[in-house]
Image (spheres, helix red, strand yellow):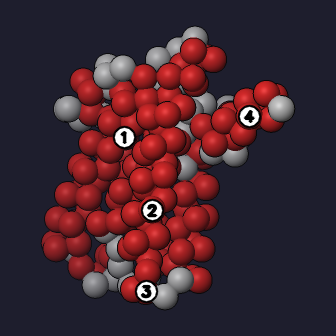
């Protein structure tokens, strides 16, 4: 039974093993969030969609904090690249505050901006990742998502046609 729990933790931390991608593991590992968001957008009534995104954001944040230290000990690295639950949380935060009428435009812009700011890690994203355990793993991605949200809001204001407004 212990092996089952270890494999379950590994599946959650790695975005169902997509975090093991040899190329762009954080980007590939974000895809489960896109799938969940697609299910939310296509199968839930509009009045429940934001609540559902918030629930998945909360679950992914809790998972990061709860499993972050385990993942670091297991890999022997601080914020291991295979751990992508933080990227999933970051995507959910972005789509919680940036959504268009078009699912495809929302995913395109939110995914692109979230990944961009997570990769470049502007201040304080770069400094906050030194927080202990799961907090350090999670917080840098959430700060990067705040940058993505601000960028997307400004971008939509200047170029509304590009985001479908």
Q: Which residue is mark 1?
A: 141
Height in image: 87 above or below 4? below
Quadrant of residue 94 within the rendered picture: bottom left
Which of the two marks, 1 or 2, is nearer to us in this view? Answer: 2
Badge 1 vs badge 3, beta-carbon distance below 8 Å: no
Earlier along the polypeptide chain: callout 1 or callout 2?
2
Q: CA distance from mark 4 to mark 2?
A: 23 Å
Q: Secondary structure at mark 3?
A: helix
Q: Residues within 10 Å of mark 4 (few under 14, many from 20)?
A: few
Image quadrant assignment for residue 98? bottom left
Q: Earlier in the sequence, mark 3 or mark 4?
A: 4
Q: Sequence-wise, which precedes: disc 2 or disc 3? A: 3
Marks 2 and 3: which is nearer the front? 2
Disc 2 to disc 3, C-alpha distance: 15 Å
Q: Position of residue 59 (x, y in %)?
A: 48, 52
Relative to 111, 94 lies left or right: left
Q: Earlier in the sequence, mark 1 or mark 4?
A: 4
Of label 1 and label 3, which has the lower sequence position? 3
The answer for how far apart the CA atoms under marks 1 and 2 are is 17 Å
Of the two numbered discs 1 and 3 in the rendering, the one whose residue sits closer to the viewer? 3
Distance Cα–Cα, label 1 vs label 3: 27 Å
Side (left or right) of 22 relative to 87 = right
Mark 1 to mark 4: distance in Å? Answer: 26 Å
Percent x, y of residue 145: 31, 49
Q: Which mark is residue 46?
A: 3
Q: Nearer the viewer, residue 72 or 165?
A: 72
Which numbered marker is on residue 55? 2
Residue wearing tag 4: 5
Q: Residue at x 50, y 28 (%)?
A: 68
């Amino acid at each position: 039974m212990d092996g089952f729990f270890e494999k379950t933790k590994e599946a959650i931390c790695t975005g169902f093993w997509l975090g093991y991608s040899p190329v762009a593991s954080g980007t590939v590992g974000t895809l489960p969030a896109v799938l969940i968001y697609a299910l939310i957008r296509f199968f839930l009534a509009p009045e429940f969609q934001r609540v559902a995104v918030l629930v998945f954001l909360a679950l992914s944040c809790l998972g990061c904090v709860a499993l972050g230290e385990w993942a670091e000990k297991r890999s022997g690295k601080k914020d291991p690249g295979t751990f992508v639950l933080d990227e999933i949380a970051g995507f959910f935060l972005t789509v919680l505050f940036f959504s268009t009428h078009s699912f495809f435009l929302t995913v395109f812009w939110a995914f692109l901006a979230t990944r961009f700011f997570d990769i470049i890690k502007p201040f304080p994203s770069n400094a906050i990742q030194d927080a202990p355990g799961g907090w350090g793993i999670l917080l840098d991605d959430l700060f990067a998502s705040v940058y993505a949200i601000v960028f997307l809001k400004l971008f939509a204001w200047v170029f509304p046609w590009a985001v479908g407004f």
